[in-house]
Image (cartoon, grey):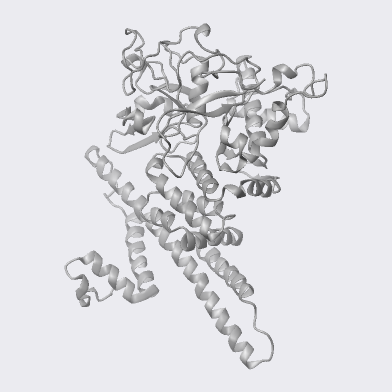
Amino acid sequence: MTLAVQDLGAAAGDPHQQLIEAVRAGGPGALAEELGDRAHVLSALTGFPQELFAPADPSAEAFRDVIGSLHSLRSAIDALETRAVVALADSLTLRRQSEARAHAAQEAGEETPPAQLLRAASREAAREVSMLTRRSPASASRSLAARRRLVADMPVMLSALADSQVTTEDAYRTARSFAPLTPAQRREADRLLGERLPYLDGAGSEEWADARAAAISLADPDGEARRHQHAKRERHVTVRRGEHGMATVTAHVTALDAALIRKRLSLEAERLRTAGDRRGHQAIQADTFVDTLIGRSGSMEPVTLDIGVIITDHVLLDPGTGDLAQIEGYGTVPAEAVRESLRDPLDAIAGTDEDPLGPDGPALRAVLRKLYEHPRTEELVAVESRARAFPPALARFIRLRDRTCRGPHCNAPIRHIDHIRPHAAGGCTCLENGQGVCAYCNDKEQQLASVERVGDPAVDGHVVEWTTRLGTTRRTRSAALTHRVEPPDPGPREQAAQLPTDGTAPQEPADAPGRACTREPDGPTGAACPGGPAGPTGPIDSPESADPTWPMSPRKPTGS
């Protein structure tokens, strides 16, 4: 680059600052030249690496640093491109405004409305970006709208993208999800999400979606029902071409219906696998989906499904509080998305001897159960077991607490309940030492240097640190049940109702909420679990000591 950085005395002594000031002084042309030089160097190294990428054992750490630096560079370039595309659109708008004024001065007539000029300039900018980046015009147009929001109303997220704290995909998804908000609400949601960034270090896209939904709900609690109804009107089915004679069918439906569909297909796949079908789990789901829709032989028969919905008592009593609901196996949804579906099974029978749900109504009616959240982290807390395998009640509770795989940046559904400290190494079968993982992350001992609980459970909640053999670390946390602007008051409180439709009767809990594990697999009662606090409670060994279908029963019946 030929910029005269030596003439900038203000940045003397710091070559990086000299270059920054030179580019600023040179304007967009200087920036384009500098980026072109860097692109030429990287392209030459890629095309003609010679011995640069020769594998060698001592070079593993160096290659790790290269990948980390490339990730940082890519994030900074994406943030820079965001500003550049918006600047291009604004420049074209100014050009069109100038042309419109000149045209109006020469010929009699009204000037073109500013909104029309802005729309035309945006379409022209989208077309320019489309041809430069080899993307479709529709995709370029959508990304331009998201980029405008990032530049105008989301400074925290744009800065996080530039500093590689978030991925480009997460930044753009956040900008698109903020579209229904006003500029002021968008800035507030951006601030709230920025406060959560330290807790999203190891988060995957599913946890990011929960964080976005919580920020939107807190910034505009009154608009939750409106946003849901508007989104519900956009239900659709699409068919997209795949590779090698395949295709992808996508149905955009309500979250509760989607969770039921997935659970029904998964149960059918498990049934057929148990019966000896050698097809893969996913293949059976796909085949059953097609057979049932088309009406081929072997399609599924109608059944009644049990699926859990967690919704706070605040929302049940006051829908305007902004708290979100959780669907088992799916994640966060606006409370409005499940209120209508829950009304019929929860309504009491009044004025008639006939149950609207039929003769099986008492068994099908949803059951309310109280759950308890951590007073600081808002994650769910409950009980433990001495067995090596996690009992069904505790396993289901962990699935509800973690929602998706706890591996860093992993969004896969939970397939296994894993001991953080392996059982063979003395790890206990308890809530503190358990986490939900997918099949890939369940092999963590063979992939990583260590996976361990960190932090103070009383303050930080359930935090797990994953460390690779090259030293990269990420921390994952249990998903928060609620998100508040102000820190919660100390002390556990009855926060949520669990609504399974299994018809089981409520029972008294054996102890107060927030129980911690208290026993090693073969140790004496009262020995604390590694990484977890000791507590006064005993183990759960039999169905008589706890509700066999739920890890935390209510203090008193709250539903039928």
- Report the number of numbered marks: 0
Q: What residue is rendered at 53% in x and 75% in y?
A: 92
Note whether residue 85 is visible: yes
Left or right, 59 with respect to 220, comes to: left
Above/below status of 323 relative to 296: below
Task: Name the spot of residue 297 as percent of width and height, x first.
Answer: 77, 24
Quarter containing the C terminus: top right
Above/below status of 11 relative to 418: below
Q: What residue is rendered at 45% in x and 13% in y?
A: 389
Task: Name the spot of residue 210 as percent of width and height, x first.
Answer: 51, 41
Task: Name the spot of residue 531 as percent of width and height, x first.
Answer: 32, 24
Quarter occupied by residue 538: top left
Query: Which residue is the extreme one toward the bottom?
Result: 106
Above/below status of 549 relative to 115: above
Task: Name the spot of residue 182 as percent of width and height, x first.
Answer: 56, 58
Query: Which residue is the extreme one toward the left?
Result: 13
Note whether residue 1 is visible: no
Q: Nearer the viewer, residue 203 or 138?
A: 203
Q: Nearer the viewer, residue 300 or 419?
A: 419
